[in-house]
Structure formats: C-alpha cells, structure tokens
Image (spheres, grey):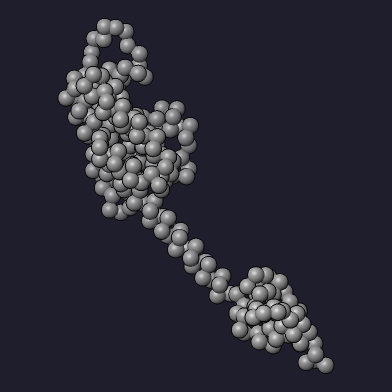
Amino acid sequence: MDSLNELISRNLDRFPQFEYYIPIIEKAERNLEPHPDITIECCLSLIQGISKTIILNLDKTADPQKLENDKNECRVHNQFKRAAELLKAHDTIYEAAFTGSCSGLASIISNLRNARGDISHGRAVPKILQSDMELARLVMEITDSLLRYTLASFFAINLEKQAKELEEMEKHTQEEEANLIQYKENPEFNDFLDEEYPLDGKILYSQALYTLYYEDYEIQLQEFLDEQALLNEE
C-alpha cells in the first residue's frame, strides 16, 4: 500500500489529521504473511474510516453518531457509496458510478472481517477458518487502488475550495482597500495637520497618522470637512 501511504504523506502539510491512517496501513503490510486476517481487517478499517472522514467533511448535515450506530448508515458499503456520491457532487469528473459500484467489494471485505477477523471479533483457538496470504494481498491491493483514487479526489476538491476561499479573501481585501480614503486626496487637511503638529525630520505628521492610525485620520478628516462646510455656509 505504498502508493496510498505516499499520497497521504505528501499531503500532510495541508491535511495533518490523515496521519492517523498511516500506522493502520503499515500494520496491514506487516501482517500480510503472518496474520492475513489482520491485514484484511486493517483494510476494512481504512475503507470505513476514510469514507466517514469524507462524509463528515463534505456533508455538514452528517451525524457522526449515526455513522457509528445507525443500522443502515454504519454499514461500510453504504458509507463508501455515500462518500463517492459526495465526491461526485463536488467534482463532476469523479467517477462515482464506478467507485460506487465498488461498494459491493467493501461489503465482501466486511463479511470476511466478520467471519475471520482476529481483533474486533475475538476467536477461540485453534482458529477454524483463516484467510490465506494471497487473498489478503488481493484485498490490500483493491483497498490501495480504491482509496488512492478516492483520497486524491478528496484532496483536490479541498484544494479547489481553499483556492476559492483565498480568492474571495483577496477580493474582499481589494474592495476594502478601494473604499479607503486616499492620502493624496486631501492635501488641505494634510497641510493643516502638518502645521498643527510639526515633526522634526523628514516624516510628516499627516502621513504618520494615515499610515499608523488610519481610523483616527478618518475621524479627524471628517471633523475638518464638517468645520470647512460650516465656514463656507457663513
């Protein structure tokens, strides 16, 4: 499962929470030969965990408790299919029909885990039914391929979302800057301030006030303009 591990590791700077899955990947690989059913169980855990994470990130109405306890929502094939549908809703290129149909594979892996898993279902010894290494390898390769494609799509969607949010922030900043009073637009007021509060050196009081305390500059400018208006009326 090197490709899935590498994908997660490459995106840890933006999605550090996904580091949680790396030890599970490593455990699946480590147990392939000595404990094939542990490998299968780890694969199911990855499918289910990543599906839940995608659902909770892309559907703000999703209930974490239902994903854990509801009879239908907690089934892994339903979770994987729902995650695929949510990815499709956010990315028209995502092949939800193809990956969604793979939810049947998730269901088969779940059945294998229920029948043969060593951890979540304790077994009496000697263990009667045990998967062989090649079956576990197949499950691991399927899991690696499905989750690599699914996660790559999820990461891309979030990148686009972040880019749009950054674009909106920059646009908002530009709009705010456009609404600011321009220093050079009020030479009479600036001269008044500089004469009223002369400073030694090259810096001008008006420029310093505008740069460092823009709100005070704006208030004093309005007072200055109001006084000028009253004088003109007289």
Front in this rendered view, residue 12 or 97 = 12
Q: Quadrant of residue 34?
A: top left
Where's residue 58, x and y in %? 42, 46
Residue at point 23%, 15% (across, down): 130
Instruction: Single out the residue that lies furthest toward the front.
Output: 201
Residue at point 35%, 31% (across, down): 23
Q: Quadrant of residue 84?
A: top left
Left or right: residue 105 compared with residue 91: left
Where's residue 172, x and y in %? 52, 66
Residue at point 39%, 39% (across, down): 18
Viewer can see residue 90: no
Where's residue 144, x and y in %? 25, 36
Viewer can see residue 66: yes
Disc count in the image? 0
The relative height of residue 45 versus residue 210 in the rendered view (above or below) is: above
Q: Quadrant of residue 98?
A: top left
Residue at point 30%, 24% (across, down): 41
The N terminus appears in which quarter of the rendering? top left
The relative height of residue 116 versus residue 74 in the rendered view (above or below) is: above
Instruction: Single out the residue that lies furthest toward the left.
Output: 134
The relative height of residue 82 versus residue 206 in the rendered view (above or below) is: above
Left or right: residue 66 compared with residue 100: right
The relative height of residue 211 versus residue 102 in the rendered view (above or below) is: below
The C terminus appears in which quarter of the rendering? bottom right
